[in-house]
Image (cartoon, grey):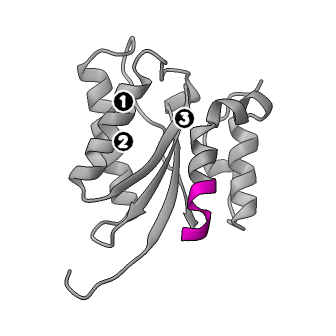
Amino acid sequence: MPNTFTQIYIQLVFAVNGRQSLISPSFKETLFKYIGGTMRNANQKLIAINGMPDHVHILVGLTPIVAVSDLVKDIKVASSRFINDKKLVRGRFSWQEGFGAFSSSQSHLSKVARYIENQERHHARRSFKEEYLSMLRSFQIEYDERYLFKWIES
């Protein structure tokens, strides 16, 4: 789009269906590269990606040619197909419905990217539920407990 100038940074968070720990270290890097390719094909800029066996965080420089929900849908569909076609998990892989999308300013990008890159360290101290609810509160997002991810209680 000529004469359109934007600076939109979004952190996306979504979980494996049933919050199963299916994203294995053996294929995690390959999956994240595949997701990066999916984003490049959608003309979006991947800044950081990481996650745990049951969820993923992605920091994206978003262009206004696609809605956030459409991008997440495309990522989920393509990555589920990739995992299933390559038979990377036993049974059928899918993502839970829904996602979190949290905006970031240019001045906070490196901090958010470091946070994403250090997921393992964060989750040594805090569950995904604690992390996600904290993000919702920090961004002052109203939510109904009935529509949050299905949690695994420890």
Q: The disc labelled 3 sits on which kind of residue?
A: Gly
Report the residue marked by disc 3.
51
Label for residue 112? Answer: none
Residue drawn where x is 56% and y is 66% of the image: 103
Residue drawn where x is 77% and y is 24% of the image: 154
Apparent side of residue 35 relative to residue 124 in the rendered image (left or right)? left
Question: Crowding at label 3, few (<14), some or many (≥20) Cα neighbours within 10 Å?
Answer: many
Apparent side of residue 38 relative to residue 18 in the rendered image (left or right)? left
Asked if the residue under mark 3 is in contact with the one under mark 2, i.e. CB atoms within 8 Å, the reply is no
Structural distance between the alpha carbons of marks 1 and 2: 11 Å
Residue drawn where x is 41% and y is 27% of the image: 29
Question: Crowding at label 2, few (<14), some or many (≥20) Cα neighbours within 10 Å?
Answer: many
Question: Where residue 146 sits in the image (x, y, percent)?
Answer: 66, 49
Residue drawn where x is 68% and y is 37% of the image: 128
Report the residue marked by disc 2.
76
| Marks 3 and 1, the one that precedes in the sequence | 1
Q: The disc labelled 1 sits on which kind of residue?
A: Leu
Q: The disc labelled 2 sits on which kind of residue?
A: Lys
| Marks 2 and 3, the one that precedes in the sequence | 3
Report the residue marked by disc 1.
31
Question: Where residue 99 sits in the image (x, y, percent)?
Answer: 51, 50
**Residue 96 sits above or below residue 82 on the image:** below
Q: Which secondary structure, mark 1? A: helix
Please tell me whether mark 1 or mark 2 is closer to you in this view: 1
Asked if the residue under mark 1 is in contact with the one under mark 3, i.e. CB atoms within 8 Å, the reply is no
- Magenta segment range? 105-111
